[in-house]
Image (cartoon, grey):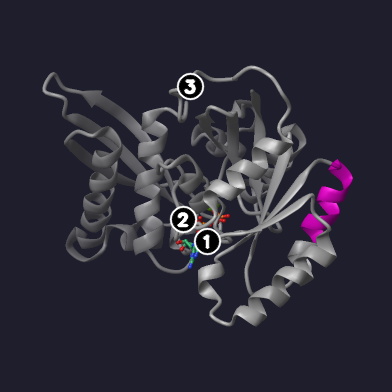
Amino acid sequence: MRSGFAALIGRPNVGKSTLMNHLIGQKIAITSEKAQTTRSQIRTVYTDERGQIVFEDTPGLTRAKNKLGRFMVDVAEKTIADADVILWIVEAGAYLGASEQEILERLRKVNKPLVLVVNKVDKVQDKKALAQSIEAYEKAVRPSDLIAVSALKHQNMEMLLETLFRYLPEGPLFYDEDTVTEEPMRDIAAELIREQALRLLRDEVPHGIAVTVERMHEREDGTFDIDAEIICERESHKGMVIGKGGQMLKRIGTGARKTIEEMCGAPVNLKLWVKVRKEWRDNDTQLKSFGYDLKKLK
Ligand SMILES: Nc1nc2c(ncn2[C@@H]2O[C@H](COP(=O)(O)OP(=O)(O)OP(=O)(O)O)[C@@H](O)[C@H]2O)c(=O)[nH]1
Ligand SMILES: [Mg+2]
């Protein structure tokens, strides 16, 4: 048996969370077309007869603009430091830009097995251009292994798992074989609400949003009652989150309820409130109260 920790790292929006969900075969991490969706470490577990891979999804590496951004970079760095193997995800069709160079320098310092995953191959129609971009990555990075995949189309997932097992140490399982995640259900529910905010709100509004689940209660008939708060950083944002006649908040609630129901496998009664906490992304106390706390990392 082999078992160990695989860190998923890379620039924002390259598909780290989508890839992790497809590798474990379940949606645990939220995803969106907006950069900087993932804000903390999300741990999931894949187990089969070969052993166990503990995946650790991380926030996209980019320059921090505030204390939340600093926290996100710290999370990625700590995850890299603790991993047995690094999965560095990049986009097919692109080349090593300035942000990748910075990541490469970081990785050179840690000296761990590096699997370079070239994702979104489905987006590149020109096969010659695809081959050239893969070759350029290979030359510049010299990874332990390179695999081209499409997380979205579920292509080459088995090949990637097979490769990862090769880089894990031999040893007993860390979690029991049925475990997919130990993230609390209320934390996932809060993330699923934030995912709808990312999908439906424009510009900088969703980046200034935090969500907390204040109450999650299962009734005897299996229905879940969930009360949650959407926190935004400005009064003007609050207006946009609520929308004309409450329309936007209603759409966020309906979308989130559906995805939370899928997770719970039960009906959900979701109530949302909107609050303002001015510039919370630069406030240590508030960051901690919303769960952005390095001490809480596993
Ligand atoms: N076409 C295509 N799109 C993909 C693929 N993988 C991910 N995406 C899309 O890329 C966008 C970003 O995906 P995420 O998984 O949220 O990216 P991420 O790297 O986790 O982003 P951050 O959390 O912001 O760092 C989403 O719109 C995904 O649907 C892929 O293989 N092909
Ligand atoms: Mg992500």
The residue carrying pointer 3 sits among few (fewer than 14), some (14 to 19) or many (20 or more) residues within 10 Å by Cα, namely some
Residue 241, image quadrant = bottom left
Mark 3 or mark 1, which has the lower sequence index?
1
**In contact (CB < 8 Å): disc 3 and disc 1:** no
The location of residue 144, given as percent across then percent down, is 79, 49
Marking on residue 288: none
Q: Nearer the viewer, residue 94 or 261?
A: 94
Q: Which residues are magenta?
A: 102-111
Q: Nearer the viewer, residue 253 or 111?
A: 111
Q: Which residue is mark 1?
A: 150
**In contact (CB < 8 Å): disc 3 and disc 2:** no
Amino acid beneath label 3: Glu
In the rendered view, tell whether residue 59 sits above or below residue 222.
below
Amino acid beneath label 1: Ser
The location of residue 190, given as percent across then percent down, is 38, 40
Report the residue at 34% width, 47% height from top. 193
The residue carrying pointer 2 sits among few (fewer than 14), some (14 to 19) or many (20 or more) residues within 10 Å by Cα, namely some
Q: Nearer the viewer, residue 237 or 203?
A: 203
**Residue 146 in view:** yes
Mark 3 or mark 2, which has the lower sequence index?
2
Residue 107: say if magenta. yes
Element on which disc 3 rests: loop
Q: Which residue is mark 3?
A: 177
Q: Which residue is mark 2?
A: 154
In the rendered view, tell whether residue 10 sits above or below residue 123.
above
